[in-house]
Image (cartoon, coloured by chain):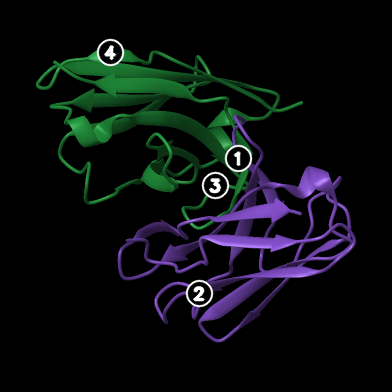
Chain colours: A green, B purple
């Protein structure tokens, strides 16, 4: 059974930093593309970043490029999202998402439970 | 404003059929497949349909999808109270080199 457990959220001040983690199990982690999707309170879904399983290419939404970094540790079956220079508009629940195969365009087939990040001074 | 356009709300009585549209452009829906996600209240989204019209195991055949040109639609027949949820379409966008979502449609079962 595929399982994704998101953690690391919390209160962060503008200009601070935070690292989100996603512990994966139930599948061959290194072979799959992984993604972070966020949802601001009361709002819709917004794609944040993806990391492919075939060649470790990374992709970012314009709103976070240069501030967020996606990475993975295949030895720990863990996906990360490093958040730097956060802004109030980054406040959201962040979901770790497994894609159906290793490429960037493979659909999202499993979602974590989400972790809340609140940016406030 | 979302790249993919969905109606903000939809409704129907139990047993009825409802459809939810998703409009995009040549760089996303016009070129790539569309996927649909269901988000029940206070829960994480879940895959509902993939590759325009494919159902993952466990999804009832009351849910169906279609795509034509730069638009797609989700149809739900035999509406049930447990179908009350938010529904999102998504597709890869070749111009943005990233994923795009619709703004979501809140379905109410009357």
- Tell me the residue at 37%/66% (across/down): B3
Q: Label 2: chain?
A: B
| Foreground pick, B81 / B71 | B81
Q: Label 1: chain?
A: B
Of all residues, the one furthest to the bottom in this rendering is B69
Determine the CA span between mark 4 and mark 2: 37 Å
Relative vertical location of residue B21 with respect to residue A73 in this rendering, above or below: below
Q: Secondary structure at mark 4?
A: strand
Q: In this figure, which residue is indicated by the disc labeled 2?
A: B29
Q: Residue A11: which numbered mark, if any?
A: 4
Q: Is residue B54 left or right of residue B106?
A: right
Quadrant placement of the N terminus of chain B: bottom left
Quadrant placement of the C terminus of chain B: bottom right
Q: In this figure, which residue is indicated by the disc labeled 3?
A: A102
Q: Residue B45: which numbered mark, if any?
A: 1
Crowd tier of the residue under label 2, counting other residues whose Cα lies within 10 Å: few below 14, some 14–19, many 20 or above: many
Determine the CA span between mark 1 and mark 2: 21 Å
Residue A121 figure quarter: top left
Q: Label 3: chain?
A: A
């Amino acid at each position: 059974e595929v399982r994704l457990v998101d953690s690391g959220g919390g209160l962060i001040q503008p200009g601070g930093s935070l690292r989100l983690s996603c512990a994966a199990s139930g599948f061959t982690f290194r072979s799959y593309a992984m993604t972070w999707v966020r949802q601001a309170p009361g709002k819709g879904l917004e794609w944040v970043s993806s990391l492919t399983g075939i060649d470790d290419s990374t992709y970012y939404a314009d709103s976070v490029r240069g501030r967020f970094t996606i990475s993975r540790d295949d030895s720990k079956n863990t996906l990360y999202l490093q958040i730097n220079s956060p802004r109030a508009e980054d406040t959201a629940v962040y979901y770790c998402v497994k894609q159906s195969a290793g490429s960037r365009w493979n659909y999202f087939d499993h979602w974590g439970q989400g972790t809340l990040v609140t940016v406030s001074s | 404003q979302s790249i993919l356009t969905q109606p903000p709300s939809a409704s129907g009585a139990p047993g009825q059929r409802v459809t939810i549209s998703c409009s995009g452009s040549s760089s996303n829906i016009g070129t790539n497949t569309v996927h649909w996600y269901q988000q029940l209240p206070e829960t994480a989204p879940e895959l509902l349909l993939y590759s325009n019209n494919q159902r993952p195991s466990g999804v009832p055949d009351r849910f169906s999808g279609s795509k034509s040109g730069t638009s797609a639609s989700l149809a739900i027949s035999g509406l049930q109270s447990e179908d009350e949820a938010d529904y999102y379409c998504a597709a890869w966008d070749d111009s943005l080199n990233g994923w795009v979502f619709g703004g979501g449609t809140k379905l109410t079962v009357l």
